[in-house]
Image: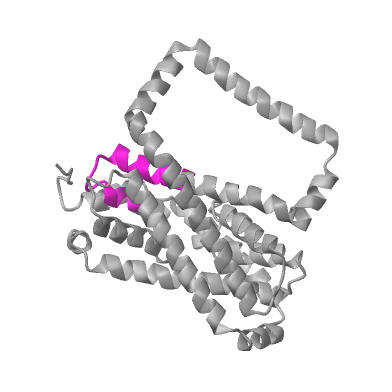
Amino acid sequence: MEWVPTSRNSYNMRLHRISGLPWLRLIQILCTLGLALVLWHSINWGLFAASLAGLHWGWLCLAALLLLIAHGFNVVRWQLLILPDRVNFASILSYYGAGIFSNNFLPTGIGGDGVRAALISRHTPMWRAIWSVAADRVIGLVGLVSIGVLGLWFGLPPFVADLARSLSTGWLVGITILGLVAVASLAVLWRLVPAVRAHTITAAQRLLPASEIWLRIMPICYLLSIASVLCLVLAHSCVLLALDLHISTGAAIWVVVIGSLSLLVPISVNGLGVMESVYVLVLSYYRVSAPDALIVALSIRVLMILFSLLGGLISLGQSWFVGMAAGR
């Protein structure tokens, strides 16, 4: 039996309760404008136009296909995490589409994850909905970090290697000791304080699925995450090839890893300016000019927006969307 809201306005009320603060949105707007201004003054727009005119569109089409496949892996991964016997694939696809649309077009302050959690709670209790989205995000990050480990085969990004060399051995030892002390302190707290241990176990039993389900779906979800990130890396490689930039595969890996991690820091509106600045910075260490690096970033941004629009269109015709709009 499906769990449904008790009123037609429940989605809007739930979304309002988890929305962002006005002051945070103001900071994001100011940071976005500041980053855009810096980029505007750092780019040679004549070279930008020349590189843009010489793009090989076949490689861009292949990049778009790879990004679409990556989204497909993400949808299937999320379906596994929210018990597919309760929610059909069409609903999950439309909710995922609403999430990526929100990420790029709706200034909700909560992003697509909050939208997905609120929507999937139409079928399952809110705690379960939040768990599915949080687990999906964590597994996605684990897959991203795993590809970052693969990137070590091609060597650290030059600026990271320079930073590592500049750190003294004493600093590295100190940071390691501090981390071990923090982990040991948490372990001792969990062991010696019964209340902490009891609450932890209770929360885990409530939030996590049954162990047999966990053991069955988590390896599959991890592999789907790896496949999704690899598609992103290949898509970036295709965009680089569209500009006739034949550089190390490690460049595409590190652009994806560092660029994706930078978007987790909500200092700008929908990551505008942040992702573009990271691309220009990282690719500059691989001797890619700032105009070309910006074209790579904007190409990926445009493809993201196009798929966000597609996600919005998929969601537009669904009955839940009509009900949500009528309940405003």
Which image quadrant is residue 30 in?
bottom right
Q: Is residue 183 left or right of residue 307?
A: right
Q: Relative to 105, say whether 10 is above or below.
A: above
Q: What is the chief secondary structure element of the magenta stretch?
A: helix
Pinpoint residue 166: horizontal percent, then vertical percent.
85, 46
Do we see residue 29 in this rendering?
Answer: no
Whether residue 73 sits left or right of residue 124 in the image: it is right
- On screen, residue 183 versus residue 65, left or right, reads right
Number of dots carrying numbers = 0
The reply to whether the magenta stretch includes residue 122 is yes
Which residue is at 17% across, 44% downward?
2
Residue under the point 72% across and 56% down: 154
Judge whether residue 90 can be spotted in this image. Answer: yes
Picture coordinates of residue 293, whole percent (x, y) = 67, 72
User: In the figure, residue 22 lies in which quadrant?
Assistant: bottom left
Q: Quadrant of the N terminus?
A: top left
Closest to the observer, 212 or 296 = 212
Q: Position of residue 40 (x, y in %)?
A: 66, 75
Residue 201 falls within the magenta-colored stretch: no
Relative height, residue 166 to residue 309 (above, below): above
Specify start and end residues of the magenta stretch as a single range.
116-138
Position of the C terminus, as image quadrant, is bottom left
117 left or right of 35 in image? left
| Residue 319 place in picture, x, y as percent | 18, 62
The colour scheme applied to this rendered structure is one colour
On screen, 56 above or below 215?
A: below
In front of the other: 149 or 299 = 149
